[in-house]
Image (cartoon, helix red, strand yellow):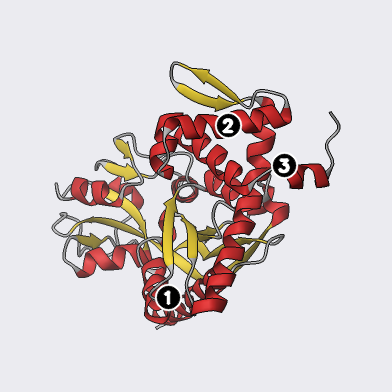
Amino acid sequence: MQFTHLSVARKLKFYQLVVFDQVLQSGSLLRAAQALGLTQPAVTKIIHELESYFDAPLLIRGNRGVSATPLGNVLARRSKSLLAELRSLTDEVNAFQEGTSGHVLVGTLISASSSLLPRALQMLKQRAPKVLVSLRVGQMDQLFPALAVGEVDLVVGRVPDDWRWHHESSQLEAEVLYGEELSIVAGAHHPLIGQTPVSLADLLDYPWVLPTRDSLLRRTVDRLFDEAGLAVPSNVVESLSILTNISLMQDQQTVAVMPLEAARQFTGAGLLGTLDLGSHLQFGDIGYFRAGTRELGPAARLFRECLEQAGREQHGELAS
């Protein structure tokens, strides 16, 4: 059967794509039915309708759930972009009909989750309380593909120099908001807190919490030790969980690295102290990414305005 865009438009329904996408996200027909408020037979019927129309299986059913066939992967990839546009259309119609409302999906890296992002969200909620915001925390390798297909509207975090090497970078645009520094932190009563200056060599024998090896922050930390002519500490826990890291540092021995804006919240609360290395450590640029091939909906545009305002305020605080 030869398909045309008109034949697909006549037969294919958006709701079928919504169900198909949810089945793949859930990995199960039953869980998808529960998420959508449908019965499992209703979900099964919709999948069978899709498979009948395309005259080919779209799902592989196994003991561990369902996954997509090669054709199913094609449909899933294209569906994400279509559903992102449907969401934007819904937001624009709602905004036109009843004022500012809608749904914003934000991907975030650890470098922006502690200060910049909460500020921007507070501003957004003051201006548009009806806007729903969903946050997705991850690494760039996870969030860039999601941004390219419309699963998230913006990705907020560090903008590394080499981001254009990523596969999806040709579809994305980056906006830098301010430059961030890096802090070496420990429990507030660590024996070296208050000593000036402290060298990295002085800290090698202490336990460390370092970022996981797939993170941008870990590359910065590795370069820091390399430039000092030192090997990375051997007594290490790898973690990106801020709460876990703070708990580990309460032994008053463990040392960690943290973006300055994140560290300030916990040093101000008396949980952590900053170890003074005698110079400023550069972490990198903080900003956001968006898909250059897709227009933001009104709610996402408003959130971007709040994000840029929060960035200007953050830049002013760091400069003062």
Rendered position, 148 above or below 113: above
Mark 3 or mark 2, whichever is nearer to me = 3
Q: CA distance from mark 3 to mark 1?
A: 39 Å
- The numbered mark, 3 or 1, whose residue comes first in the sequence reads 3
Please say if the residues under marks 2 and 1 sit with CB atoms less than 8 Å apart.
no
Mark 2 or mark 1, whichever is nearer to me = 2
Left or right of residue 86: residue 64: left
Label 3, residues with CA under 10 Å away: few <14, some 14-19, many ≥20: few
- How far from the left and from the top, in percent, is residue 80? 61, 47
Label 2, residues with CA under 10 Å away: few <14, some 14-19, many ≥20: many
Give the residue drawn at x 48%, y 40%: 214
Left or right of residue 268: residue 212: right
- How far from the left and from the top, in percent, is residue 51? 65, 28
Give the residue drawn at x 18%, y 67%: 269
Q: Which structural element holds mark 1?
A: helix
Circle 2 sits on which residue?
Answer: 47
- The numbered mark, 2 or 1, whose residue comes first in the sequence reads 2
Mark number, residue 48: none
Tell me the kind of residue under disc 1. Leu
Mark number, residue 11: 3
- How far from the left and from the top, in percent, is residue 165? 68, 48
Please say if the residues under marks 3 and 1 sit with CB atoms less than 8 Å apart.
no
Q: CA distance from mark 3 to mark 2?
A: 14 Å
Tell me the kind of residue under disc 2. Ile
- The numbered mark, 3 or 2, whose residue comes first in the sequence reads 3
Circle 1 sits on which residue?
Answer: 124
Give the residue drawn at x 61%, y 64%: 89
Residue 260, picture quadrant = bottom left
